[in-house]
């Protein structure tokens, strides 16, 4: 049941990131077309930039769990057995530490923005904690994903964020094309 909830959380964050991507597209389209017909979207640039930050951070956990995040595979893939497992746990420990540090301070920043009633400096005054929620939520979900993966590997499981190695030359080429290499 916990696995279903966590996977649903990562998927929902990915869908939210996709929703913000669509919002960015619509805002940019509206801003571009609006210039042609003298219609202005107030604070459109601010909304697009806040959406971009939310999209980037909300997509992190889904990207990590899908095996699409850049990681230390070039180093770890050379090892097998216990040595590889130890390196994998070390990498996850460092990841948990860094992501936890950033998530903690992001939560503090957002709470301080709420507490001090910080407002945006743009055309439309918006409480800063509102656009910061996307960034904070994404980091907290990524932290949960790292802890989830750390516990799984610590219990003896294979990392779920790794894709199995390519078996055919066509698959190698397909993966390279998908990654943009």
Image (cartoon, grey):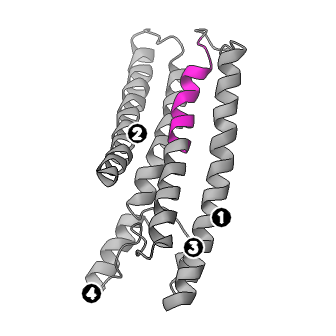
In the rendered image, which residue does mark 1 sit on?
94
Dominant secondary-structure state across the stretch colored magenta: helix
* Magenta span: 126-139
Query: Which is closer to the viewer, label 3 or label 4?
Result: 3
Task: Report the front residue among 26 and 50.
Answer: 50
Task: Report the front residue among 36 and 123.
Answer: 123
Residue at point 50%, 84% (across, down): 77
| Between discs 1 and 2, the one toward the N terminus | 2
In the rendered image, which residue does mark 3 sit on?
89
How far is disc 3 from disc 4 in space, using C-alphas? 29 Å
- Residue 15, compared with residue 4, is above or below; it is above
| Between discs 1 and 4, the one toward the N terminus | 1
Image x and y of residue 18, in percent: 36, 39
- Other residues around mark 1 within 10 Å, as few (<14) / some (14–19) / many (≥20): few
- Location of residue 45 (image quadrant): top right
Task: Report the front residue among 53 and 139.
Answer: 139
In the rendered image, which residue does mark 2 sit on?
17
| Between discs 4 and 2, the one toward the N terminus | 2
- Residue 31, compared with residue 68, is above or below; it is above
Query: Which is closer to the viewer, label 1 or label 4?
Result: 1
In the rendered image, which residue does mark 4 sit on?
168
């Amino acid at each position: 049941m916990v696995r279903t909830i966590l996977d649903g959380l990562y998927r929902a964050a990915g869908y939210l990131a996709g929703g913000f991507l669509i919002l960015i597209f619509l805002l940019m389209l509206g801003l571009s077309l609006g210039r042609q017909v003298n219609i202005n979207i107030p604070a459109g640039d601010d909304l697009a930039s806040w959406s971009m930050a939310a999209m980037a951070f909300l997509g992190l956990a889904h990207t990590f769990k899908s095996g699409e995040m850049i990681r230390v595979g070039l180093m770890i893939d050379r090892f097998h057995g216990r040595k590889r497992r130890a390196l994998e746990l070390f990498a996850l420990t460092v990841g948990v530490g860094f992501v936890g540090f950033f998530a903690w301070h992001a939560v503090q920043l957002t709470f301080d923005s709420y507490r001090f009633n910080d407002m945006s400096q743009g055309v439309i005054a918006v409480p800063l904690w509102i656009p910061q929620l996307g960034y904070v939520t994404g980091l907290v979900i990524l932290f949960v994903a790292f802890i989830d993966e750390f516990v799984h590997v610590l219990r003896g499981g294979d990392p779920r964020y790794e894709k199995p190695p390519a078996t055919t030359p066509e698959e190698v080429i397909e993966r390279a094309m998908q990654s943009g290499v």
